[in-house]
Amino acid sequence: MIGKGIKHFRDINGLSQGKLAVKIKSTQQHLSDIEIGNKKPTMDFLEKVSKALKIPVPVLFWFGMEEKDFKNKMVAKILKPKIDQMMLHLINTKK
């Protein structure tokens, strides 16, 4: 669920839902609904979030994935944490 990816990077950046909502010209309620999965974001919304958080949209999707999203449970248990760590390292070196 991409909302978990958005929340993950919003938290890393120390932004409240309200502050991120202002940056992307949305509302805190709309952002909250997307983060918890009550609403699906538009591509325009995702591009605004991506720009505000300085995180590519595909990375938001990746960090929103859960074990149940993988057909191969080994990928979820072994590879995903390692890929998460690698992506975070790459993102942090570009800032």
Image: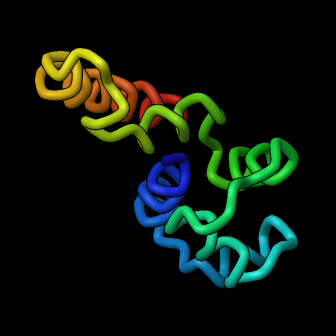
At 66% across and 79% down in the image, what residue appears? Answer: 19
Examine the image and state in which quarter residue 22 appears.
bottom right
Left or right: 90, with 24 as reference point = left
Residue 1 drawn at (x, y percent): 49, 47
Q: Nearer the viewer, residue 12 or 25?
A: 25
Left or right: 86, with 12 as reference point = left
Residue 94 drawn at (x, y percent): 53, 30
The C terminus lies in quadrant: top right
Examine the image and state in which quarter residue 27 appears.
bottom right
Residue 16 drawn at (x, y percent): 54, 79
Left or right: 28, with 89 as reference point = right
Examine the image and state in which quarter residue 79 appears.
top left
Q: Nearer the viewer, residue 56 or 34?
A: 34
Left or right: 62, with 15 as reference point = left
Residue 69 drawn at (x, y percent): 36, 32
Q: Is residue 76 above or below residue 72?
A: below
Identify the image's colour scheme: rainbow, by chain, secondary structure or one colour.
rainbow
User: Tag count in the figure?
Assistant: 0
At 20% across and 30% down in the image, what residue appears? Answer: 81
Q: Which of 40 and 48 is in front in this view?
A: 40
Q: In this view, does 29 lie above or below 1?
A: below
At 54% across and 40% down in the image, what residue appears? Answer: 60
At 13% across and 17% down in the image, what residue appears? Answer: 74
